[in-house]
Amino acid sequence: MFSRLRGDFPILHARVGESPLTYLDSGATSQKPECVIDTFTEYFTQRNAAVHRGAHTLAVMATDTFEAGREAVANLVGGAPNQVVWTKNATEALNIVALGIDRASHGFGGEAAQRFAIGEGDSIVVTEMEHHANVVPWQQLAQATGAQLRWIPVTDDGELDLTDLETIVDETTKVLAFTHVSNVLGTINPVAELVARAREVGAYVVLDACQSVPHMPVDFTDLDVDFAAFSAHKALGPTGLGVLWGKTELLDALPPVLTGGSMITTVTMDSAEFMPAPQRFEAGTQPVAEVAAFATAVGYLTEVGLDRVFDHEVELGRRLLEGIAQIPGIRVLGNAENRIGTVAFDVDGVHAHDVGQYLDSQGVAVRVGHHCAQPLHRRFGVTASTRASTYLYNNGDDVERFLTALAEVRPFFGLEDPPAAEKAQAS
Amino acid sequence: MTTQMQQLYQQVILDHSRSRIGNAALLGDSAPGPHGHSHQVNPTCGDEIELETELAADGTVTVRWTGDGCSISMASASVLTELAASATVSEMLEIEGAFHELMHSRGTVEADEEILGDAAAFTGVSKFPARIKCALLAWMAFKDALSQAQAGAPEQTPTAPTEDEEK
């Protein structure tokens, strides 16, 4: 099955110079199947109109498309369609929550929003393995409200160190924000354990699901999180579209930060009343074509089955780890047992940029740098790493081509001996 | 492809990236001569350099730096330091101008080895847009630190005319 569906992705037939493309950067963005690409043409040639306004036929069709997308996402991740808010990306989704809490803390949103209000004496907890998108908004919120920012550290194995969970997440904690799956290490975090602790102290749980929703079955209702964020483009969908998922009661109480048209009930020259979620967060003209395309992507993923996608990627990840272990001078970051098919590593004596440049010369596309997770890299004593991340369209040949190219990196840069031998020579 | 890789990673670059000239402890304000300091970061990859310049009475400038980054950025800092050891400030500014132009040429400009010396080895970098910033990082720090050193100098060291003035 997985060997056949590779044919659905036109870009995977591309060549980079003389080499076939080996795309192992799906953690950054996924490639798109033809049906998703075609949806754009179909939408703009047959259904294009602004949504939630106008009574003409096209406007109705576009609105139906837009709302059907919401339903498709709700079927994918759990909950009702009105729990799905369209955003520009996952970063915006996380900012809507952080900034909404900031507004509530400054008196916006009336009594209903006071449940979110935080200030001095309160704390916000994140983890050391977060993407910057799930750190910086909380830093800003802490600065704006006087609340304290704390974080859960990471072990040498690249897992969350929950030894001191009870003191880090305590009675002062109002928000616990963490990633479901690390975008660097691929570690799958124990959501249930963290949610249980948050419930004990009455903290809201915000889940960054960018690296989980595309790669494994996820149900936010089952996980019992309060808010969750992910992006369409990492899950076979288009860029420019993200999702904020939330419990209905909370979404309806959270003050919106982006205000204007399409999110109000009545407006006078002095004031405005806002619609309930999801519309209260969807001011302005919406990305309807992107929603249509994402609905197609969700249909594609559902048809393949995310449980099978998960197994396929875990197997590729296992082969990556096994193969990398055979190459001298490579240190894999983290060693979590529970992980997706993503592997980040450091090549002794060769900077990640140079590693990526060599791999690219062999047609292998990987991510290099800090992957928007500088604190995590600092934790592992490096400023940058190289990351290979798999998806449903990758196969054993991709893994082999990657490993062959990786084995050539240190020799190309004149470091043929394994580091142990070099040290022996030096001393 | 390999040929292009070899053009990018010239032996000069690989050598300088391993044995880095000028990669030494910074003196900060304890430097006796007029001095300047600059910290530059490449936000896309986290490469960084801290570089200081110290003007000498004979019109030359000493460069010291520490940094962490890819072979291109580290080699570039090393070559810069080496060039500074045998050039006047105005010659260094001429080299800086030529290097800047070379890096933005997308491979269309022939490097003038007489001006650029070992910095001509970076010609291949200009064909890789994602790496140009790596090669320029140390030079940006140098320009910044130099202008600070000059501002602190009792008598302004004559500088080379800028492109605008030439026009």
Image (cartoon, helix red, strand yellow):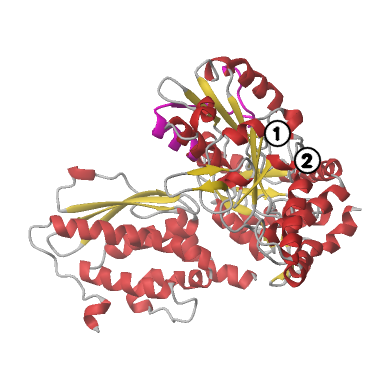
Q: Earlier in the sequence, mark 2 or mark 1?
A: 1
The answer to which quarter of the image holds residue A345 is top right
Q: Is residue A141 magenta?
A: yes
Q: Amino acid at mark 1?
A: Ile
Amino acid on which the number 2 mark rests in the picture: Met
B1 w.r.t. B62: above or below: below
Q: The residue marked by circle 1 belongs to what chain?
A: A
In this figure, which residue is indicated by the disc labeled 2?
A: A216
Residue A85: % across, % down: 65, 45
Q: Nearer the viewer, residue A219 or B1?
A: A219
Q: Position of residue A65 (x, y in %)?
A: 76, 57
Residue A6 lies left or right of residue A116; in this view the side is: right
In the rendered structure, the answer to whether residue B77 lies left or right of residue A199 reads: left
Badge 2 element? loop
Q: Mark 1 and mark 2 in contact (Cβ < 8 Å)?
A: yes
- The circle drawn on residue A188 is 1
* Residue A135 vertical position relative to residue A148 in the rendered view, above or below: below
Q: Position of residue B81 (x, y in %)?
A: 32, 59
Furthest residue to the left? B154
